[in-house]
Amino acid sequence: MEFKDTQKSVVVKTDISSQLKLDFKILCVQQETTMSLAIEKLVRKWLAESGSVIPRNTRRSQGDLEVLGIYIPMPLKMELKVLCMQRKVSMKTVLAQLIEEWVAANLCSLPA
């Protein structure tokens, strides 16, 4: 799956733990995808389900957090933003939770 040249990509950012960021990167490499494409798929799925499950806040101590910037198509960002506003949840929270759940579901493929 590749970005279409006709769609402008924009960055969205979230704060996740250093370990989660590392696990996410490793899993994406193992699955021969990029972090941006993995997130794009997760966001599209979440939107298709109308954001039915509102992510819980998974914030950790501030010292443990790193910023993760991900590129997604502008229309997808706008859809995400609107649904997050309707659900009264931040985009950062949704993105962090989607990453955390995806990593947890795929963690068995990480080397020990």
Image (spheres, helix red, strand yellow):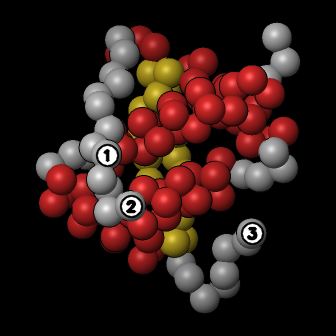
Tell me the amino acid under the disc marked 2. Glu
Q: Quadrant of residue 108?
A: top right
Residue at 65 percent across and 58 percent down: it is 37
Q: Which residue is mark 1?
A: 53
Residue at 15 percent across and 49 percent down: it is 88
Q: Position of residue 13 (x, y in %)?
A: 43, 46
As displayed, is residue 112 above or below residue 103? above
Upstream in the sequence, badge 1 or badge 3? 3
Residue at 36 percent across and 44 percent down: it is 94
Q: How many C-alpha atoms fall within 10 Å of the one at disc 3: few (<14), some, or many (≥20)?
A: few
Q: Which residue is mark 2?
A: 49
Image quarter where the N terminus lies is: bottom right
Q: Position of residue 21 (x, y in %)?
A: 60, 29
For marks 1 and 2, give the CA distance. Answer: 8 Å
Q: Secondary structure at mark 1?
A: loop
Tell me the amino acid under the disc marked 3. Met
In terms of depth relative to the viewer, which is nearer, 68 or 27?
Answer: 27
For marks 1 and 3, give the CA distance. Answer: 26 Å
Q: Is residue 14 left or right of residue 3?
A: left
As displayed, is residue 6 above or below residue 19? below
Q: Secondary structure at mark 2?
A: loop
Q: How many C-alpha atoms fall within 10 Å of the one at disc 1: few (<14), some, or many (≥20)?
A: few
Q: Which residue is mark 3?
A: 1
